[in-house]
Image (cartoon, helix red, strand yellow):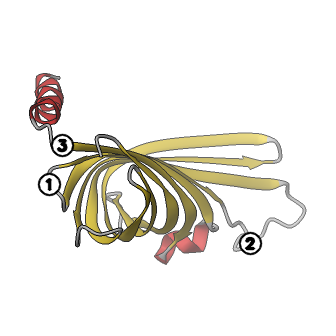
Amino acid sequence: MKKTLFLIVLFVGLIVSNVQAQLNFGATVGLQLPTGDMGDVLKTGFGLDLLGKYMVNDNLAVGVDVGWSRFGIDMSGYDLSGVDAKGSGSYVPITALLEYHFGTGKVRPFLGANVGLYTAKVKVTVQGMSVSDSQTNFGFAPVGGIEYDIQDNLAFTANLKYNYILTGDDVNDAYIGINVGIIYKLNK
């Protein structure tokens, strides 16, 4: 708890101390494509991310990203003829982000990474009986994208993010996000 409080105070102190600092807030939505073994079980999903970034300088950003991705469960590989069965799965990543933006013009490509905790939730209903489970694991997500300044304080963003979750099992979970959204820039 003390470490968390210290990091929050440090982060706020950095923001307040640098008058040239810029805070960015945004949201993205997009398709989430399960890969590997996860792709055998989950269907293509939908995701939403909310993010806050502190521009350390013109090119470097640090911040937080909170997301939610939902997937349907593909039960076609099971012999369930005549059985009413359905299911869904979701991930809630809460991650720190680091981005490097190339250039300072209106169009700025970037590369980065998110690192943090991913909470997985699964719910399956068979013949009206539901079973659900959840677990939290460490994960990371390399990301590449582009920001395009629409106005001085508003930008369009698009990115490709590869979410990789370390489950501790023989199979790790992974999905690719294809996302678009808006970034609102304070202090510009």
Which residue in the protein does label 2 denote?
Answer: 76
Q: Position of residue 76 (x, y in %)?
A: 74, 72
- Of mark 2 and mark 3, the one earlier in the sequence is 3
**Which amino acid type is shown beneath numbered disc 1?**
Asn
Which residue in the protein does label 3 denote?
Answer: 21
Contact between labelled residues 3 and 1, with CB atoms less than 8 Å apart: no
**Which amino acid type is shown beneath numbered disc 2?**
Ser
Label 1 crowd bin: few (<14), some (14–19), many (20+), radius 10 Å: few
Number of disc labels: 3
Q: Is residue 93 visible?
A: no
Please state if 107 lies on the left or on the right of 83 as rendered: left
Q: Quadrant of residue 169?
A: bottom left
Residue at left offset 53%, top offset 70%? 34
SS type, badge 1: loop
- Which of the numbered marks, if any, corresponds to residue 85? none
- Of mark 1 and mark 3, the one earlier in the sequence is 3
Q: Quadrant of residue 85?
A: bottom right
Q: Position of residue 149 (x, y in %)?
A: 41, 62
Please state if 96 lies on the left or on the right of 75 as rendered: left
Q: Is residue 2 above or below residue 143?
A: above
Q: Position of residue 116 (x, y in %)?
A: 28, 49
The one of 138 and 64 positioned closer to us in this rendering: 64
Residue at left offset 60%, top offset 68%? 41
Cα distance, mark 2 to mark 1?
50 Å
Q: Quadrant of residue 54?
A: top left
Residue at left offset 26%, top offset 62%? 113
- Furthest residue toward bottom: 36
Cα distance, mark 1 to mark 3?
7 Å
Which residue in the protein does label 1 denote?
Answer: 57
- Of mark 2 and mark 1, the one earlier in the sequence is 1
SS type, badge 2: loop
**Which amino acid type is shown beneath numbered disc 3?**
Ala
